[in-house]
Image (spheres, grey):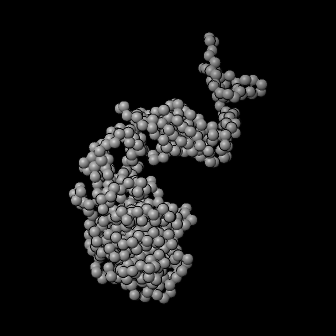
Amino acid sequence: MGNRRRVVERRKTRPAVLGGTIAVVVVGAGFGAYALFGGGASADDRAATSASADQKHIKTGPLSATEVKTAAQGFLTSWQQGKVTKAAAVTNDSAAATTLLTGYTKDAHITDVTLTEGTRSGDTVPFSVKGTVSYKGTTKPVAYDSSLTVVRNKADGKPLVDWRPSIVHPDLKDGDTLVTGESGTPPVKAYDRDGGELTTAKYPSLGPVLDGLREKYGKIAGGKAGVELRVVRGKESQKAKLSDKTLLELSKGTPGKVDTTLSPTLQAAAEQQVAKKAKSSVVVMRPSTGEILAAANNSHTFNVAFQGSLAPGSTMKVVTSTMLFEKDLVHPNDSHPCPKTYKMAGWTFHNDDNSEIKKGTFKLAFGASCNNAFINFAPKLSNSDLTKEAQQVYGLGLNNWAIGVPSFDGSVPVQSGAQMGASLIGQGGVRMNPLNMASVSATVASGTFHQPYLVSPSVDHRTLAKAARTMSSTTQAELKDVMHYTAMYGTAAQAMAGMSGEYGAKTGSAEVDGQKKPNGWFTAYKGDLAAAGVVQAGGHGGDTAGPIVAALLKMGG
């Protein structure tokens, strides 16, 4: 029969034995034997047995301290030694880790890295980073703190570092990179309205604002670029309107000069106020001009005051009321009940604390912030009515504000059914920030929308946004009536106590999925000042954001 070649199956399990005879796989005439003995149910049973055996070795459950420590040390040691591929292999996204860790040396020019592990907390391991940044003969040390988290890989049960760009540097987000080189944008020195220099030492929360000013005006302010280590933002960060950030200056450039509208007195006070409340932000502006006088955030990493995108809750009722008054659907002293519940498109809406107003005026419902007194107008409205009101009278949601630094201009999308009803009370798809809501109160105070701005448009000859139309003097008077009532006798009364002159306010509480407490909002005006603030996960606006806003309004300006 000539030479026969034996085909050996590569496997760890022993060959099948049938009746004491080992099944042999042969070519040609022996194929029938392969079909009989090598396939069918017996093969399936072996595969299942093998898979079952493999599964038994996949470890599950919480990570042990040893597993966390081993994975963390493996990653940190390899990174420190410059073994990028080996370090990336200990993560759950080796491709992304390889790219960023390679760029750490190649693009950021950071060498002589020392990584020192801190005290583990559960599955998270903090560590410190020390290194040297070198570029064209200029060298500077760099040091910062970071952390990593170890997770169990579902596929094989191995402990791996859960990859995040922030491991490499806490300011990095997905798509961002670290780069050392001649900055494309010269530095700037920013000044307040009185000529004082604005620095993060004086005003800690102005970091993102100063970064934005440099990005916008660095090339036209007369400065000269230096050499720096900086975060260059990727597409996702750019969508979020985050600016590039300087981490270390190797050689200083010559800064240009940018004047702003900020009031040193109000800015300092705003910083003090937000320092008292976690996750708080506030903006103060001048209604007659649109000048931004103060902007502060408890967090110094992201500018919620200008760029936040949060449901504004009942502060949106100022815009809703404007629409209702203009449509002649209701007026402040009209009798208008606020039922305990209101059903719409399968949803049941409730008031705060399940309250109700059986007999009362619309002004009373506004002052008490009774939700269903607004939602029950939904059947008389078109889906686009609130969107048009916000855009045409308040200049919101058109993405055309040019304040001098990145900002989010609010969003009031056209919605239908229950979502449309929710929008009337600042929930649903409505999104705002303190800048937007300060502008709402400013528009009520002046009767006309003036786009907020931080840098005078004369500096770069940019065009400020305009509103398509102006509310009537009658509507303005009605809005001032209900807002003053709220500040005197309603949900804003405690915060606004002791106020004098012409003033008004509106509180808000916005429910957020997963939060035990709502975001607290407050918007108000006094004379030629308007302000708004938010305290995320803080509770009712009158108790949280209210004291911050009221304290600043009482200062005047």
Quadrant where the C terminus lies? bottom left
Is residue 216 placed above or below 533 in the rendered structure?
Answer: above
Q: x, y percentage for residue 446?
A: 30, 75
Residue 140 image point, x, y percent: 42, 37
Q: Nearer the viewer, residue 479 or 427?
A: 479
- Whether 82 is drawn above or below 511: the answer is above
Residue 150, position in %: x, y?
59, 43
Specify the quadrant that holds the N terminus: top right
Depth order, front residue of 387/116: 116
In this rendering, does residue 140 appear at all?
Answer: yes
Up-down: is 67 above or below 321? above
| 33 sits to left or right of 537 | right
Tell me which residue sits at (46%, 72%) in the image. 546
Q: Quadrant of residue 422?
A: bottom left
Residue 438's x, y, as percent? Answer: 37, 69
Of all residues shown, which one is farthest toward the right?
20
Name the residue rendered at 48%, 36% in the picture: 131
Q: How many marks?
A: 0
Q: Is residue 436 visible?
A: no
Q: Residue at x 25, y 60 (%)?
A: 457
Q: Residue furthest top?
A: 2
Query: In the shown orientation, is residue 44 left or right of residue 250?
Result: right
Q: Quadrant of residue 176?
A: top left
At 67% from the left and 40% from the top, the residue drawn is: 66
Q: Which one is in front, 4 or 54?
A: 54
